[in-house]
Image (cartoon, grey):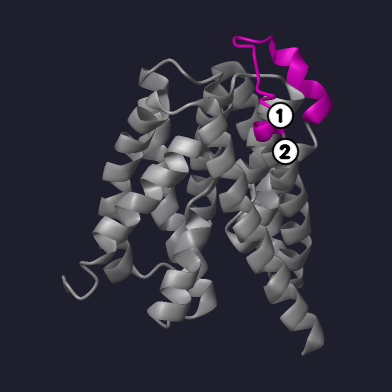
């Protein structure tokens, strides 16, 4: 095993702490590192980023479950709805340009994150827990869209699931974050299995990044317990706004070219 990428371990650990504490998918932060800094081809950067995220989100989800912070019935329902979107998204990459998909997703998550940021400053937070499973029925269309975009761009499940859980279902902020991370982790496993079959994951990179997010995924939920909901929501919103802006910029460049 080569130790060329050893420095990715502490970087990945910090990304996992940030993502797991605030409820957004950290895989998108690995894409520019893998693609622009390590000069990996974009498809390999996305696949390896998602494989890395899979370990980090799974680590965080397990810790949140042990903390009894996950809305399990709602989470499992969203997982079942997410998987078809993942499968469809995997095939969509064959016929749809990746930058066009990022352009569309950029506007969606930018708008959602901006609304969440406004709610943070208005101190509008979720208040409920242990809600009945039928409350998710009117939002059944959201998880497949999140799965579709996560499979095609590496982002989407957490960024769409967290606002639905908190704003739509009025679930407490920390429980919304934890449940969204469980849904993301499971969806990521499906995407990673497909990418593994396609041979897109670069293991020399993944081994160090994966070790980092494994540790960070355990630390993030501990950090979340001691941070105010307002801070968590601001971190989520600003992170997703940056991601959305990056995707819109890439989409505009694609359109102009």
The kind of secondary structure element at disc 1 is loop
Instruction: Identify the residue shown where x is 32% and y is 62%.
Output: 206
Picture coordinates of residue 70, whole percent (x, y): 50, 21
Whether 135 is among the magenta residues is: yes
Picture coordinates of residue 173, whole percent (x, y): 58, 25
Left or right of 183 in this view: 131: right
Whether 232 is among the magenta residues is: no
Answer with the quarter of the image where residue 83 lies.
top right
Instruction: Identify the residue shown where x is 77% and y is 52%.
Output: 108
Instruction: Identify the residue shown where x is 48% and y is 56%.
Output: 27
- Magenta extent: 119-139
Q: Is residue 49 visible?
A: yes
Instruction: Identify the residue shown where x is 34% and y is 51%.
Output: 14
Q: Write down the residue under mark 1.
A: 122
Picture coordinates of residue 166, whole percent (x, y): 67, 26
Left or right of 244 in this view: 135: right
The answer to which of 249 and 165 lies nearer the viewer is 249
The kind of secondary structure element at disc 2 is helix
Q: Write down the residue under mark 2.
A: 118
Is the residue under label 1 in contact with that under label 2 (CB below 8 Å)?
Answer: yes
How many numbered dots are placed on residues in this image? 2
Picture coordinates of residue 118, whole percent (x, y): 72, 38
Q: What is the quadrant of the C terminus in the image?
A: bottom right
């Amino acid at each position: 095993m080569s130790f060329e990428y050893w420095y990715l371990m502490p970087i990945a650990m910090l990304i996992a702490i940030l993502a797991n504490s605030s409820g957004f998918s950290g895989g998108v932060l690995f894409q520019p590192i893998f693609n622009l800094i390590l000069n990996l081809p974009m498809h390999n950067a996305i696949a390896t980023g998602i494989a890395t995220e899979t370990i980090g989100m799974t680590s965080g989800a397990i810790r949140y479950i042990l903390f009894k912070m996950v809305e399990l019935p709602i989470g499992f329902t969203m997982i079942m709805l997410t998987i078809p979107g993942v499968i469809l998204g995997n095939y969509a990459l064959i016929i749809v340009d990746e930058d066009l998909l990022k352009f569309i997703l950029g506007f969606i998550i930018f708008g959602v994150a901006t609304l969440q940021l406004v709610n943070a400053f208005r101190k509008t937070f979720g208040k409920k827990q242990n809600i009945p499973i039928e409350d998710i029925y009117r939002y059944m269309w959201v998880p497949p869209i999140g799965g579709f975009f996560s499979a095609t761009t590496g982002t989407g499940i957490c960024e769409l699931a967290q606002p639905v859980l908190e704003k739509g279902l009025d679930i407490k902020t920390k429980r919304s974050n934890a449940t969204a991370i469980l849904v993301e982790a499971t969806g990521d496993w499906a995407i990673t299995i497909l990418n593994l079959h396609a041979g897109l994951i670069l293991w020399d990179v993944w081994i160090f990044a994966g070790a980092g997010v494994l540790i960070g995924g355990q630390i993030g939920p501990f950090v979340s317990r001691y941070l105010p909901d307002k801070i968590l929501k601001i971190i989520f919103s600003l992170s997703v706004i940056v991601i959305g802006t990056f995707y819109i910029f890439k989409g505009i460049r694609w359109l102009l070219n």
